[in-house]
Amino acid sequence: MRSVESLPLASDRKGLFLRFATEFAFRPQVIPFPFRLQRVGVPRRSSRWTSTSRSTRMESRMTKSQYLAWRDQLSFSHTPGVTAGVLLFDAGLAAAAAWMIFMAQPHWLFWLGQALLAIFYFHNFAILHEAGHGNIHRRDVVNVIIGHYASLFCFLPFYPWRYIHHEHHTWTGNPEKDPTMKQILRMKTRKRIPLAVKFTWRSWIPFGAVLQHFVFWSYPISAWREDRMKHWRRNMVISVLFLAAGYICIAGLVGWAALLRLWPSFVIYLLGVELVNFPHHLDMPTVDPASEKQRLYVWEQQATTRSCRYPGLLSELLVLNFNLHTEHHLFPTLPWFRLKQARQLIKPDLSRHYNEAHGIGWNYDMRTGDLDHIVEPNYILPPDRNAETPVSRD
């Protein structure tokens, strides 16, 4: 195995960068720590492209009646006091982070403040997610107000995100119709992964999270070009203008120089988005585009969704249980603080059909292995039973 030091040196910086990038993208085994986090005993996937599709039989023991029995044991009532408590806690968290970044003397406090600010950003993303589902308050106007407030600190326009996320839940497992899988669909169609994506993914540069944010920000333009969602375009434009006006006001109050000092927190947040969000659906089986069944019922979405397990209270403290994604897809209107109760119900019954990664282990495996399997066909074969009527998500 050759190390980076043994690679032939280029005569200029550009040549050296291109040579290093090429080795990095196609031969991850030559990358030393800390870029490559070797995990002993982790099997590597084949790097060869194959046109033979893989199929996964959806053999879960879950049925519609079992799903309804689970749902009857859960409480979907709104508890806005919990959200108010999180917002107050986050206000204190942001104040403490600002003091560490701008006022404290020890240099290590500067970086601690940046990390705390990144947690503040992700909390607001989770609150925006709750507001988008209407899980905060029974009156949607309250959800919209809180969602727009949270959007300021997670850098996502509320209405475009809400509409895209609704489509995501409607078409989970169908990359041709799920707008959140737009980039993955493009790579599947071309049957290759761009060099820039491979390089940034293996170097832990959160380029994928940037692309994901771009999808939400550009959604109003896409809807206008494709002549879709005519009745909702105004809402989407309002959300985008709200963010633009909000950032201009914040910059006017604190100054652009102060905002530029926060760039590490933004990078940490984007990396956190990749670590937490990307395992949920990437490298999971999808609906066969040639199949008559293009939409999964809500109780079937566990076949194409993965949860992540974090130790202790980290799930609540860091990401507000956003890692419990299988539970969320089965019960989209269940508040975040009740998702662990749902996990206790469904995991024993689903047994080996419950998809779960431990911590950020999935990210370690994926960033040190070959990515070609991401664009390989891997289709869900529906269970051999009579079709049932979809269940309401309310």
Image (tube, rainbow, N blue to C red):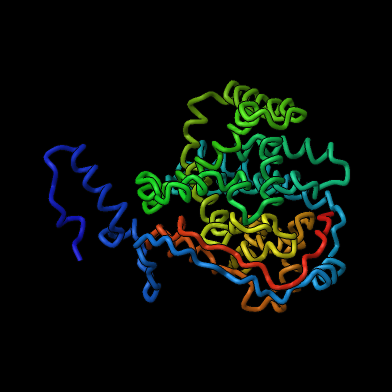
Nearer the observer, 176 or 274 = 176
Q: Residue at x 44, y 64 (%)?
A: 52
Question: Which of the 4 image quadrants contains residue 173?
Answer: bottom right
Q: Identify which residue is drawn at 73% across, 25% down.
A: 234
Location of residue 46 (image quadrant): bottom left
Residue 111 in the image: above or below residue 341: above
Q: Nearer the viewer, residue 359 or 50?
A: 50
Give 312 or 133, whichever is nearer the viewer: 133
Residue 94 vs residue 178, the one in the foreground: 178
Q: Using residue 154 as the reference point, say whether residue 197 is left or right of it.
A: left
Can residue 119 be seen by looking at this rendering?
A: yes
Q: Quadrant of the N terminus?
A: bottom left
| Number of marks in the rendered image | 0
| Residue at the image position 76 percent from the left and 60 percent from the top | 331
Residue 285: percent from left, percent from top: 56, 62
* Left or right of 73, for residue 172: left
- Evaluate whether residue 114 shows in this view: no
Q: Quadrant of the C terminus?
A: bottom right
From the viewer's perspective, tell me whether residue 240 is left or right of residue 16: right
- Picture layout, residue 106 above or below residue 157: below
- Residue at (80% x, 46% y) in the render: 134
Instruction: Give the image location of residue 266, x and y in percent.
Output: 51, 41
User: How far across and how far down the image is residue 231, in percent?
Assistant: 77, 29
Q: Is residue 319 above or below residue 140?
A: below
Percent position (x, y) of residue 101?
A: 51, 40
